Amino acid sequence: MATKKEAEMPKEAEYTVEEFTENAAAVFGEAVSPDIVKTALRLAGVKTTTKSAATKIINEFRKKEVN
């Protein structure tokens, strides 16, 4: 059960993969292309997510070693 303080905190907004892809540079910086955003989120099986979760997924994807 949520505490009173947790209930008062606003929930972080969720956005679609398409919204993150269209605004990749503005949301994640110039170093992150729309292709990286789209691929990372799709491979994670995400259709909608928060900005903080998307950032974590994208950063992990960018750090993966390529064989």
Image: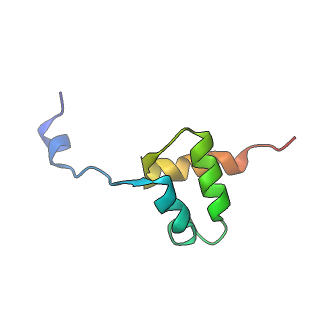
Give me the residue at 58% from left, 39% from top.
44
Give me the residue at 80% from left, 43% from top.
65
Q: Locate the C terminus and report the quarter of the image it occupies.
A: top right
Q: Residue furthest left?
A: 4
**Count of numbered circles in the view:** 0
Q: Locate the N terminus and report the quarter of the image it occupies.
A: top left
Residue 38: quadrant of the picture? bottom right
Q: Residue furthest right?
A: 67
Residue 31: quadrant of the picture? bottom right
Residue 5: quadrant of the picture? top left
What's the coloring here? rainbow
Left/right of residue 61 with respect to residue 45 in the rendered view: right
- Residue 35 place in picture, x, y as percent: 66, 59
Give me the residue at 74% from left, 43% from top.
64
Q: Is residue 34 above or below residue 57?
A: below
- Residue 26 place in picture, x, y as percent: 52, 72
Q: Is residue 33 above or below residue 57?
A: below
Q: Is residue 29 above or below residue 5?
A: below
Give me the residue at 15% from left, 35% from top.
3
Left/right of residue 4 with respect to residue 60 in the rendered view: left
- Residue 29 place in picture, x, y as percent: 58, 69
